[in-house]
Image (tube, grey):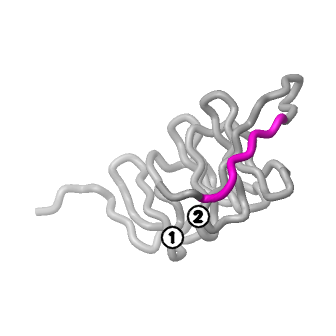
């Protein structure tokens, strides 16, 4: 594993609690992964919270951030606005403008607007 820069421990207030947050730089992105217990979130270089630490998985991509909570995955922009509602049972981060996703037995690739460019309904083929 290569060194991605310094590790920073921040003390931040989340609600009434003061929480120690481990911030790790994410390669090629102006964001840092933060954690509180077993939950993850993202902050920017100035320490502004983009996504609060409430997700089981957070993966910055281009142009959207993948975030999983419970059993569903959604996508957010870098201001923290949800762009694609939580609906996927499995998803990969965006790469070259597409993200691989699954919904039950169906799978495919979506664009940043959430529209499928290719979809397989999972039905058996003869």
Answer with left or right where residue 98 lies relative to residue 9.
left
> 92 or 38: nearer the eye?
38
Task: Report if residue 113 is visible in the image.
Answer: no
SS label for mark 2:
loop
Q: Residue 122 at what x, y percent from top left?
A: 28, 56
Task: Report if residue 16 is visible in the image.
Answer: yes
Q: Residue 13 at what x, y percent from top left?
A: 87, 32
Q: Residue furthest top?
A: 16
Callout 2 crowding tier (Cα within 10 Å): few <14, some 14–19, many ≥20? many
Q: Please give the name of the residue rendered at 84% of the width and 23% of the height, measured from the top-left corner.
A: 17
Badge 2 is on which residue? 61
Please give the label number shown on residue 13: none
Q: Residue 109 at what x, y percent from top left?
A: 44, 67
Rendering quarter of residue 59: bottom right
Q: Please give the name of the residue rendered at 83% of the width and 31% of the height, measured from the top-left corner.
A: 14
Q: Which comes sooner in the sequence, label 1 or label 2?
A: 2
Q: What separation in Å lies between label 1 and label 2 (alpha carbons)?
A: 6 Å
Badge 1 is on which residue? 95
Q: Residue 73 at what x, y percent from top left?
A: 55, 48
> 79 or 117: nearer the eye?
79
Q: Please give the name of the residue rendered at 40% of the width and 71% of the height, measured from the top-left corner.
A: 118
Q: Please give the name of the residue rendered at 64% of the width and 40% of the height, measured from the top-left corner.
A: 40
Total number of numbered discs in the rendering? 2
> 45 or 57: nearer the eye?
45
User: Label 2 near label 1: C-beta < 8 Å?
Assistant: yes
Q: Which residues are magenta?
A: 4-11
Answer with left or right where residue 46 lies relative to residue 98.
right
SS label for mark 1:
loop
Q: Is residue 16 above or below residue 4?
A: above
The C terminus, quarter of image: bottom left
Q: Is residue 20 above or below residue 78?
A: above
């Amino acid at each position: 594993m290569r060194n991605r820069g310094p590790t920073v421990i921040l003390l931040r207030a989340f609600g009434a609690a003061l929480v120690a947050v481990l911030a790790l730089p994410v390669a090629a992105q102006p964001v840092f992964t933060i954690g509180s217990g077993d939950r993850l979130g993202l902050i920017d270089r100035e320490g502004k919270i983009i996504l609060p630490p409430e997700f089981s998985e957070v993966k910055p991509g281009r142009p959207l951030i993948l975030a999983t909570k419970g059993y569903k995955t959604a996508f957010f922009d870098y201001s923290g606005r949800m762009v694609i509602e939580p609906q996927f049972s499995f998803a990969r981060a965006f790469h070259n403008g597409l993200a691989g996703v699954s919904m039950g037995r169906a799978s495919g690739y979506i664009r940043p607007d959430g529209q499928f460019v290719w979809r397989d309904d999972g039905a058996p083929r003869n």
